[in-house]
Image (tube, rainbow, N blue to C red):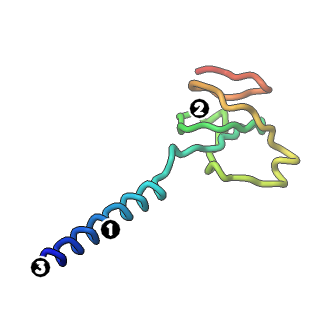
Amino acid sequence: MMENSMKVLRSIATAALFGAGVLLATANSASAYVVCNRWGECWHTEYRYSYAPRLHIRFYDDNWYSRYHWRHRYHWRNAHEGRGYWRNGVWIVF
């Protein structure tokens, strides 16, 4: 009887550890976005700030990529701290 109880406890412990491992493996890290403005400048951000409609800011998933557009229209800018946007290679804070 004691042997069966120990097997059950080991099975429960193993299942709990396995479940915890699956949760850790599938947990999403901070989501990131690619942001592009009407001037064709794009950068990474972790936040979806509200921008004035006149800026024509678009958000894409972090894995967004268009080989055609990158060659012909978009320019990559470095990520920048704080609220703002790139315009002609200059970070504009708002």
- The alpha-carbon separation of the residues under discs 1 and 2 comes to 51 Å
Where residue 34 sits, quadrant-wise, is top right
Q: Earlier in the sequence, mark 2 or mark 3?
A: 3
Marks 1 & 2, CB-CB < 8 Å contact: no
Amino acid type, callout 2 = Ala
Residue placed most toward the observer, 35 or 45:
45
Q: Callout 3: helix, strand or loop?
A: loop
Q: Give the residue at mark 2.
A: 52
On the image, the x and y values in percent for residue 28 come to 49, 51
Q: Give the residue at mark 3.
A: 1
| Nearest to viewer (mark 2 / mark 3) | 3
Residue placed most toward the observer, 28 or 85:
28
On the image, the x and y values in percent for residue 3 come to 18, 76
Residue placed most toward the observer, 32 or 88:
32
Q: Is residue 60 above or below residue 43?
A: below
User: Callout 3: few (<14), some (14-19), or many (20+) C-alpha neighbours within 10 Å?
Assistant: few
Q: Is residue 45 above or below residue 89?
A: below
Where residue 32 sits, quadrant-wise, is top right
Q: Callout 2: helix, strand or loop?
A: loop
Amino acid type, callout 1 = Ala
- The alpha-carbon separation of the residues under discs 1 and 3 comes to 21 Å
Q: Give the residue at mark 1.
A: 15
User: Callout 2: few (<14), some (14-19), or many (20+) C-alpha neighbours within 10 Å?
Assistant: few
Q: State the residue at coordinates (47%, 58%).
A: 26
